Image (cartoon, helix red, strand yellow):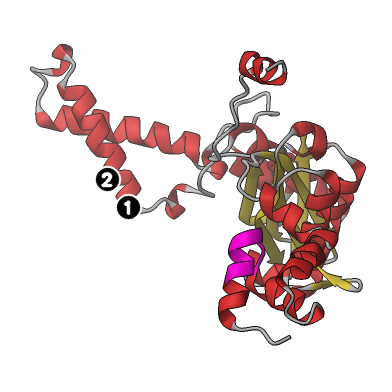
C-alpha cells in the first residue's frame, strides 16, 4: 500500500513523533496507518512524544575531561528522583563522552551522532519511554586546549564548572584550577575579568547607579565631580563582584584576589570558564498535592 506526504503529516499529528520516524513507520507497515501507529508505540516513540510537552527542569550537569578536551553537559528530567537514577546518569555520561569524541556544533547535531550502534537522539527517545519522564539535552560546552583543563561538579550535579588555563598540565596547576573552579561554583561570576565586561553592561549599571544617587536626598547638594567619583567607585566595586579574577579568593586568609592567588602558584593564565547550574532559567513545575489527591478519589 502506497502512502503520501499527507499520510506522513497525518501520522505525525496523531502521534507527535518526528517526520522521519513517521515516514519510516509507514514504510515498515506498507502504508497502513493503524499498524504504523502500533509500530511507533512498540518502538517507544509515540510514548515519548506524549511526554515531550511536560516540564523538565530537574536533572544533572556532568563533566568529562580526557586529555586536552573537556566537556560540560546539562540533561534535564522532570523529577530529581529520576536525575539520581543510575540509568539516567549513565546516559548523561555517554552523552558527555560522545560530545568529546565527535565535537558536534549544537544539540540537534549531537542527537544525530553515533554512540555505539545507535544515535544519541534514539537513545534519548528510548530512555524517555523506558523511564517514563520527559528528558531534554539542554546545552553543552566543549573546550579543546593546548594547556590545562579541569572540571568540578558540586552537589551531585547541581552545578558544574570547567576552567581552562594556559599552563603546564601538571598536578600543581590542576590543584590551582580546581580551587578556581570551586570559586566559580560558589560565587557565580559572570565574566573572567573587567576587561571582558561589555561596555553596554557597564553603561547600563552606571545609569542605575546615577538614578540611585539622584534619588538619595543626601547627595542632592554634592557637585558633579564628587557624584562622578562615587559612581566610578561603586561601579568598580560591582565589577569586582561579577569578575572572577577580581573577586576575593574565598579560601584566602589575607583577602587576596583570585588573580593574585593564581599568580602565587606561578606560570598560570586562566583563559576561560564555563558554569552550568541545573535548571537555571527554566520554569519549574509547581505541584498541587491537594488537587492531585482530589483527582485520584473522583
User: Picture quarter containing residue 286?
Assistant: top right
Out of 67 and 90, give the one closest to the viewer. 90
Which part of the image, by quadrant, shows the C terminus?
top right
Percent position of residue 12, x then y = 62, 66
- How many angstroms separate mark 1 from mark 2 (CA)? 6 Å
Where residue 267 appears, as percent x and y from the top left, is 71, 57
Residue found at x 26% / y 30%: 209
Task: Give me the disc on residue 11.
Answer: none
Residue identified by numbered label 2: 203
- SS type, badge 2: helix
Q: Which residues are magenta?
A: 10-18
Which secondary structure type mostly characterizes the magenta part of the structure? helix
Residue sitting nearer the eye, 218 or 31? 31
Near-viewer residue (137 or 145):
137
Could one spot residue 155 in this view of the protein?
A: no
Q: Which residue is denoted by mark 1 in the rendering?
A: 199
Amino acid at each position: 500500500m502506497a502512502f503520501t506526504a499527507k499520510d506522513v503529516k497525518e501520522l505525525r499529528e496523531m502521534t507527535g513523533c518526528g517526520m522521519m520516524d513517521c515516514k519510516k513507520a509507514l514504510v515498515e507497515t506498507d502504508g497502513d496507518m493503524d499498524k504504523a501507529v502500533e509500530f511507533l508505540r512498540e518502538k517507544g516513540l509515540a510514548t515519548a512524544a506524549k511526554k515531550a510537552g511536560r516540564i523538565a527542569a530537574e536533572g544533572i550537569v556532568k563533566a568529562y575531561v580526557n586529555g586536552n578536551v573537556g566537556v560540560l553537559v546539562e540533561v534535564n528530567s522532570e523529577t530529581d528522583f529520576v536525575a539520581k537514577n543510575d540509568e539516567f546518569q549513565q546516559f548523561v555520561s555517554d552523552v558527555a563522552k560522545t560530545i568529546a569524541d565527535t565535537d558536534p556544533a549544537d544539540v540537534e547535531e549531537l542527537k544525530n551522532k553515533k554512540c555505539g550502534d545507535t544515535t544519541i537522539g534514539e537513545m534519548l527517545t528510548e530512555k524517555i519511554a523506558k523511564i517514563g519522564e520527559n528528558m531534554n539535552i539542554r546545552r553543552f560546552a566543549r573546550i579543546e586546549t593546548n594547556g590545562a583543563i579541569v572540571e568540578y561538579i558540586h552537589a551531585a550535579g547541581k552545578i558544574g564548572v570547567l576552567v581552562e588555563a594556559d599552563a603546564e598540565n601538571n598536578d600543581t596547576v590542576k590543584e590551582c584550577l580546581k580551587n578556581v573552579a570551586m570559586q566559580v561554583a560558589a560565587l557565580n561570576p559572570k565574566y573572567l575579568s573587567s576587561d571582558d565586561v561589555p561596555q553596554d553592561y557597564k553603561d547600563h549599571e552606571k545609569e542605575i547607579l546615577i538614578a540611585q544617587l539622584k534619588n538619595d536626598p543626601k547627595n542632592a547638594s554634592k557637585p558633579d565631580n564628587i557624584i562622578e567619583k562615587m559612581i566610578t567607585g561603586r561601579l568598580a566595586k560591582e565589577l569586582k563582584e561579577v569578575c572572577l579574577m577580581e573577586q576575593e579568593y574565598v579560601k584566602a586568609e589575607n583577602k587576596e584576589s583570585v588573580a593574585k592567588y593564581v599568580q602565587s602558584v606561578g606560570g598560570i593564565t586562566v583563559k576561560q570558564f564555563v558554569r552550568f547550574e541545573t535548571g537555571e532559567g527554566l520554569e519549574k513545575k509547581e505541584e498541587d498535592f491537594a488537587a492531585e489527591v482530589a483527582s485520584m478519589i473522583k
